[in-house]
Structures are given as C-alpha cells and as structure tokens.
Amino acid sequence: MKCKLCNQEKKLIQAHIIPKSFHAPLKEEGQTPIIITSKDGVYPKRSQTGVYDVEIVCEDCEKMFSPWDDYGNKFLFQELHDENYVVSNGERIAYNFGLCDYKKLKLFFISILWRASVSNQNMFGRVQLGSYEKKLKKLVLSNNPGDIEDFSVALSKFDAPANETGILNPDRTRYDGVIHYRLYLGGYMAIIKVSSQPTPKCFQGLYLAPEQNVFFIVREFKQSKEYAAMVYTAKNARNPSSV
Ligand SMILES: [Zn+2]
C-alpha cells in the first residue's frame, strides 16, 4: 500500500493518531473513554490501545512522529505549579509554561491534525482540510513547524480532570470568522487555525511562537473582546522562574 506521507509503496504499520501516551493516565482509572459525537448523537466508545490507523503511514514515517509525540507528552503532562498561574481579580485566567521547543511542540499538534485528516476512522470524520491538507503534509514531511500564521496553535485547559473529560473527537469551528480545528488531548484543548486569514486579534499572544512563553487559558475559547485584556494581563505577569 502507498504511504500517505512519503507516497512510497511500503508496508503500512499500526500508526497512532492520538499518541498512546495520552491514554495511559486515563487508563489508570479503568478504561479510556472516547466520546464520539456524530449526527446520530453522542455515544461513548472504549479504547484500550489508543486511536490508531493501519492505512496511513509506513514505519519510517511513523518514526518521524516519535520525537514530537514524546515532547508533546512531556510538555502537556508536566507538573503544574501554582505560582505560574496568572490570576486576575482572584480568578485563575491562564497558566504560563514558560518557553518551549517551538518546533517540536508545533509539529506535535499539526502532525496529529494531519494524521487525523488522512485517516478514515469515524472519529476523525470532521477533519476535512481540503487544499490545506497538502500544505500541512509538506510542513510535516520537511520537519518544518511553519511560522506563527501557518496552522497557528493555541491552548486551553479546563479544570475538570482528564479522566472526566475523556477524549473528544476533533471538530471544526470559527473564531471571529476564522476556521480552526479543535483537538482534545489529555484535558487540554488545542485550537489550530486552518485558514489563510490572519489569526483573530482577540487571541493574539496566545498562539505558539518561537522564543515566546506558552500559555494555556483556563476557560473556553470564545469570540470575546475580554481576551485582549486577559492576554495583556497574562503576558505582563511575572515569568515563571523555571521552565
Ligand atoms: Zn512513508
């Protein structure tokens, strides 16, 4: 079969779309719930092995994902420290991770989006990138995270523990009219811009960028003017002492 990444005729392997590590912490509580929403409603599906697809990539291509998946896992599951929360009016509004390896973290998120887009699994049915799939594949194949405006990524995290939120299937929405996909990973929600329009002003400062602190916001992304003030507060708060 033909590998969807390198286009070569090769034996395809069981490739994880949602990395296995994102199931491990959930498994301690029993089985991993995967919540699938479809036109027919919402139904839970159990998974012991993560979400994988045997029809997308060869072994060599899957190996490209490993360092990104390892880094994403380490980054998102790092211990959170109270002093790194950004508090406004007594309320936690964001968390400042400090700096990250932009290349690895960005490729982690956007390569998951690519994997989801080429998978025929039900769970990823809503990931339809159209002409952006080629552009994304090019970045992934060339180990290139793109610049801030290419498939821009921002993070949020709700207070509910990961074992309550489970893993939701990715979906598409618009923020200030700009199309984004939402990926749900280990209690985080990552939004990825799939559009040639500029990133919405209200979230500027939250998207991953080289040499910039990484934040997650402690709330849902909404189309709201309050973000500008929030981002300003977050970015001007004391930087975390340790990264
Ligand atoms: Zn390949």
Image (cartoon, grey):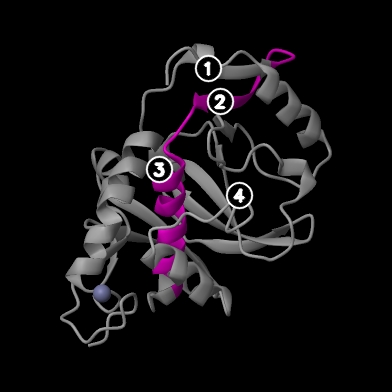
Q: Is residue 150 left or right of residue 197?
A: left
User: Tag 4 or tag 2, which sits nearer the N-term?
Assistant: 2
Q: Position of residue 103 (x, y in %)?
A: 43, 46
SS for callout 3:
loop
Which residue in the rendered view is the most extreme toward the right?
A: 225
Marks 1/3 in contact by CB < 8 Å: the verdict is: no
How dense is the environment of label 3, judged by Cα within 10 Å: few (below 14), some, or many (20 and up)? many
Inspect the image, locate mark 2, and give the three-letter code of the amino acid beneath it. Answer: Tyr
User: Tag 2 or tag 3, which sits nearer the N-term?
Assistant: 2
SS for callout 4:
loop
Q: Decide if residue 127 is in sight here.
A: no
Q: Position of residue 6 (x, y in %)?
A: 30, 77
Q: Decide if residue 198 is in sight here.
A: yes
Label ID, residue 95: 2
Query: What's the CA distance linking mark 3 and mark 2?
Result: 16 Å
User: Tag 3 or tag 1, which sits nearer the N-term?
Assistant: 1
Q: Magenta stretch?
A: 88-117
Inspect the image, locate mark 4, and give the three-letter code of the amino acid beneath it. Answer: Ile
Inspect the image, locate mark 3, and give the three-letter code of the amino acid beneath it. Answer: Gly
How dense is the environment of label 1, judged by Cα within 10 Å: few (below 14), some, or many (20 and up)? some
Front of the two marks 3 and 4 = 4
Q: Which residue is mark 1?
A: 84
Q: Which residue is mark 3?
A: 186
Marks 1/2 in contact by CB < 8 Å: the verdict is: yes
